[in-house]
């Protein structure tokens, strides 16, 4: 059977995909694992987190999940107040820094103060992004992008499930 151009292209594409699979499969686990190795002010066992958080909170905060766009009531929250971590009640964001990014997730141009959140690099989708997590418990909040408003130019794109809102 001749090895024609169409078959050769299929073979090369398949071989490339097969070679890339181990790399793609390893993407993403490093950030959650690295956070597990660090000690945070609020530290609990996995069993404790599972007992204290709802299933969706656990998936977002402890497994670095993402909620569906436009699914959080906090995306439309307009009242003055403070957004806190759903895992440990750390004050994260002020309503004064919230804006409508049109993305379907609560968005802020900065955190409430310089010690509220921390960042790391994640490769969950195959390329580097800036992950933002709670500085007190290490819970995954979302990501920071460089397309926000001035004065920072940053968009903290945060999962609403990862936060609670306390009106002023």
Image (cartoon, grey):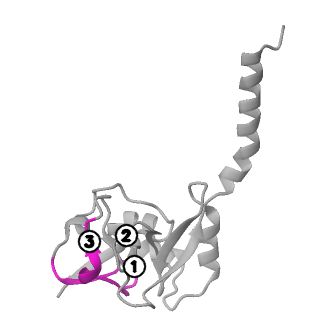
Q: From the viewer's perspective, is residue 27 above or below residue 60?
A: above
Q: Which residue is mark 3?
A: 99
Residue 2: quadrant of the picture: top right
Badge 3 local density, few (<14 within 10 Å), some, or many (20+)? some
Q: Does the CB distance between marks 2 and 1 fall below 8 Å?
A: yes
Q: Does the CB distance between marks 2 and 3 fall below 8 Å?
A: yes
Residue 120: quadrant of the picture: bottom right
Which of labels 2 and 3 is toward the front?
Answer: 2
How many discs mark residues in the rendered view? 3
Residue 7 position, x and y percent, is 75, 18
Of all residues, the one furthest to the top in this rendering is 1
Is 167 magenta? The answer is no
Q: Which mark is residue 65?
A: none
Q: Magenta segment, which residues?
A: 79-100
Residue 93 position, x and y percent, is 33, 82
Q: Which residue is mark 2?
A: 148
Callout 2: SS: loop
Callout 3: SS: strand
Q: Is residue 143 left or right of residue 39?
A: left
Q: Which residue is mark 1?
A: 152
Residue 40 position, x and y percent, is 54, 88
Which of labels 1 and 3 is toward the front?
Answer: 1
Quarter placement of the N terminus: top right
How far is mark 1 from mark 3, CA to CA? 13 Å
């Amino acid at each position: 059977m001749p090895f024609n151009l169409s078959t050769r292209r299929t073979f090369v594409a398949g071989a490339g995909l097969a070679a890339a699979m181990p790399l793609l499969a390893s993407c993403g686990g490093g950030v959650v694992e690295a956070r597990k190795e660090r000690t945070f002010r609020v530290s609990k066992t996995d069993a404790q987190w599972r007992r204290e958080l709802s299933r969706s909170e656990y998936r977002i905060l402890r497994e670095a999940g993402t909620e569906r766009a436009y699914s959080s009531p906090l995306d439309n929250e307009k009242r003055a107040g403070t957004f806190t971590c759903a895992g440990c009640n750390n004050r994260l964001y002020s309503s004064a820094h919230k804006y409508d990014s049109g993305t379907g997730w609560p968005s802020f141009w900065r955190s409430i103060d310089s010690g509220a959140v921390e960042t790391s690099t994640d490769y969950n989708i195959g390329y580097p992004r800036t992950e933002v997590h709670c500085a007190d418990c290490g819970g995954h909040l979302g990501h920071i992008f460089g397309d926000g408003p001035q004065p920072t130019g940053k968009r903290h794109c945060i999962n609403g499930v990862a936060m609670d809102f306390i009106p002023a």
